[in-house]
Amino acid sequence: MTRNGIGIRTAQVRQQRVIGQIHVYDGAGKGKSQAALGVVLRSIGLGINTPSNSNRVLLLRFLKGPERDYDEDGAIAALQRGFPHLIDQVRTGRAEFFGPDEITAFDRSEAARGWDVAKGAIASGLYSVVVLDEINPVLDLGLLSVDEVVRTLTSKPEELEIIATGRAAPQKLLDIADLHSEMKPHHHPTATALLIEGIEIYTGAGKGKSTSALGKALQAIGRGINHPGSTRVLIMQWLKGGTGYTEDAALAALQQSYPHVIDHQRCGRDAIVWRNSRQELDYVEAERGWEIAKTAIASGLYKTIILDELNPTVDLELLPVEPIVQALLRKPRHTEIIITGRCQNQPAYFDLASIHSEVYCHKHYANQGVELKRGVDF
């Protein structure tokens, strides 16, 4: 059978890999650190439902010193309170941006401190995932030795997953990566001309679209926790019915503690949908999801709305484009809309995006026959 259209991997029971991979997210587009946060959310969710302590994650953040507050801080702190055995966070560096001509002894010292933590964590065997957020620009600035970092990562424990993020990843790091997704920015003159803000789109063949959206959701949830009443978050996911998605447990835990901050809905069958295998239920579920999303957008009650896998739903012709365009044009000014997923033909609402990152696939372990992994990929 010829498969036509965009098929979305589901969380159906499948083999999964044991060997950890090295992920690199770089590029000038938005979504790199968000993708790392999305993996953190999934890893914690897997750990919640796993009796052992084998799914611990370290979120090590370079160039993000503790003097500055970040939106996601509230959500991470809440997860740490609820599941202290599943997440550690370390932040190093200055709280403000600096260029190569402004490097100080403090910057070098903080980079070295962060790398000491990273080396110890990698060698310890205590973590299933180590996130090295913004290590790429640290290497580009010459604050750490590229050769030493590459040497350490290539000798990591076999099962450990490494996530490296940030602009300007050095070639030697890219050479050893099992996955390399580049976030490429696109600009839409229509959005600029109409002064449209708050619509973000993540598309492309690379890994990191839904993962970035989950990271964005975590940031918004954290903002709502830190500043009650400032934001409410809806995560609406198409083509992902059924169970087995590891982020669900972490989102449910946050929802239980902060019921006025987050709502989460899934729609669709627990099956991959291709253009030539569409069923009546696929149309019904897609429309059900859109009715929920359309109402949420118009209500003004939500400050952040994730429309995960809306693009392939439209690409599969399960939903018409024009109602989506009209709903986005009428959205409240301060409501953020994040839309994700591959598509073969860009629908008209792409012209309304104030931020559009194409996740370009340079490398993906799945293309080499390597299985996906619970708590990382889904």
Image (cartoon, rainbow, N blue to C red):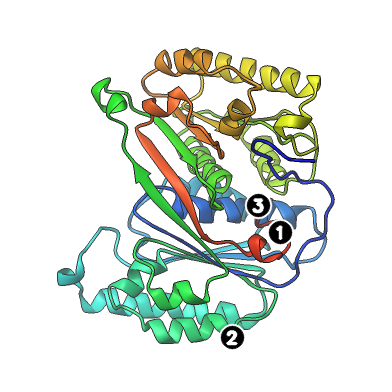
Who's the residue at 22% across and 63% down the image? 98
Residue behind mark 3: 42
Q: Amino acid at mark 3?
A: Arg
Query: In the image, residue 340 lies at what x, y percent?
Result: 54, 37
Decide if residue 92 is in sight here.
Answer: no
Residue 362, placed above or below residue 101: above
Q: Earlier in the sequence, mark 1 or mark 3?
A: 3
The residues bearing labels 1 and 2 have C-alpha atoms spaced at a distance of 21 Å
Query: In the image, residue 128 lies at what x, y percent?
Result: 67, 69
Query: In the image, residue 142 lies at what x, y percent?
Result: 29, 78
Residue behind mark 2: 155
Who's the residue at 46% across and 71% down the image? 174
Q: Amino acid at mark 1?
A: Leu
Q: Earlier in the sequence, mark 1 or mark 2?
A: 2
The residues bearing labels 1 and 3 have C-alpha atoms spaced at a distance of 13 Å
Q: Earlier in the sequence, mark 3 or mark 2?
A: 3
- 224 to the left or right of 364: left
Q: Amino acid at mark 2?
A: Ser
Residue behind mark 1: 372
**Foreground of the two, 115 or 199:** 199
The residues bearing labels 3 and 2 have C-alpha atoms spaced at a distance of 25 Å
Decide if residue 44 is in sight here.
Answer: yes
* Element on which disc 2 rests: loop
* Element on which disc 3 rests: helix
The image's mark for residue 21 is none
- 26 to the left or right of 252: left
For marks 1 and 3, give the one nearer the viewer.
1
Who's the residue at 80% across and 36% down the image? 270
